[in-house]
Amino acid sequence: MARIRCDFFSEALGMGTSMTVLLPERASAGIGMAGSASAGDPPVLYLLHGLSDDDTIWTRRTSIERYAAPLGLAVVMPQAGRSFYTDEAHGNRYWTFLSEELPEVCRSYFRLSPHREDTFVAGLSMGGYGAVKWALRHPDRFAAAASLSGALDVARRRDHPTNPINPAVWHTAWGGREVPGTDDDTVALLERAGDDLPALYVACGTEDFLYEDNVRFVDTARRHGVPVTVDFSPGDHDWAYWDAKIQDVLAWLPLRPDSTG
């Protein structure tokens, strides 16, 4: 695959930012790794980072390039700071950047399929929250969305008795705004979701401090008849878990047979 670190100016953020992009490449001579690419525009996975990381982290902590290469899948990894993928109350418009500007910028720079059936989103921790929020707020754009150890009940995290969100992070992202019941509350989004949703995948380790959030999200989905592929298995909030589970996510994605070469 081609690996591109792309530095560009964001109108939504009013500043320069970065993304790491993996693009399919038809190749067979590389030692120990073959690539695949379709004749047309490739499917794309937007892959979101967690609270302490940036756009390079998936390529540094996992073998995402090796996993995606035989699938003919482009992977876009944007940088979003510690924003929880929101238009911050005291910061930048990261939700606008992610949901509106980023797809347009990517398609202007790279050959990527514009079709819903070829577009996917996933992330870990804060990025799992961002991925599910994006998919539930814009279900017409995605065929599938996956959360790994996601902060899927963020509305309860501000006052959590043992693992609350850092008050400074919360203040920057939401200030004094109420989150419960809003479009930043993924449980509330699920409760009022329509019928034509992307396929949803939720994975979380049973030793993870976010496990209870994921259980509540899944219980809400089942109560409202929303299908979710669930993987609750032993694991903690760490890269050993995410490196394993991103492979499961890639195997689960509903890639069309004609989207890979």
Image: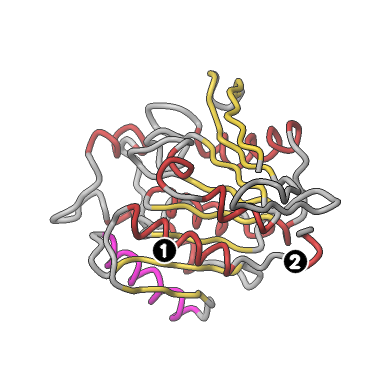
Q: Nearer the viewer, mark 1 or mark 2?
A: 2
Mark 1 is surrounded, within 10 Å at the Cα level, by few (under 14), some (14 to 19) or many (20 or more) other residues, namely: many
Q: Is residue 222 magenta?
A: yes
- Cβ atoms under marks 1 and 2 closer than 8 Å: no
Please tell me how many numbered marks the rendered image carries.
2
* Position of residue 126 measured from the top left corner of the image (x, y, whole percent): 38, 48
What is the quadrant of the N terminus in the image?
top right
| Span shown in magenta | 210-224
Give the left or right position of residue 192, taking residue 255 as reference: left
Mark 2 is surrounded, within 10 Å at the Cα level, by few (under 14), some (14 to 19) or many (20 or more) other residues, namely: few
* Position of residue 101 measured from the top left corner of the image (x, y, whole percent): 64, 34
Amino acid type of disc 1? Answer: Val
Of label 1 and label 2, which has the lower sequence position? 1
Q: Is residue 20 above or below residue 135?
A: above
Disc 2 designates what residue? 256
Q: Nearer the viewer, residue 34 or 129?
A: 34
* Position of residue 72 measured from the top left corner of the image (x, y, whole percent): 71, 54
Give the left or right position of residue 80, taking residue 42 as reference: left
Give the left or right position of residue 154, taking residue 191 as reference: left
* Position of residue 45 measured from the top left corner of the image (x, y, whole percent): 61, 51
Give the left or right position of residue 228, taking residue 101 as reference: left
Residue extending farthest to the left is: 161
Q: Residue at x 69, y 36 (%)?
A: 106
Q: Residue at x 56, y 56 (%)?
A: 67
Res 19 quadrant in image:
top right
What is the quadrant of the C terminus in the image?
bottom right
Disc 1 designates what residue? 187
Q: Which mark is residue 115?
A: none
Amino acid type of disc 2? Answer: Arg
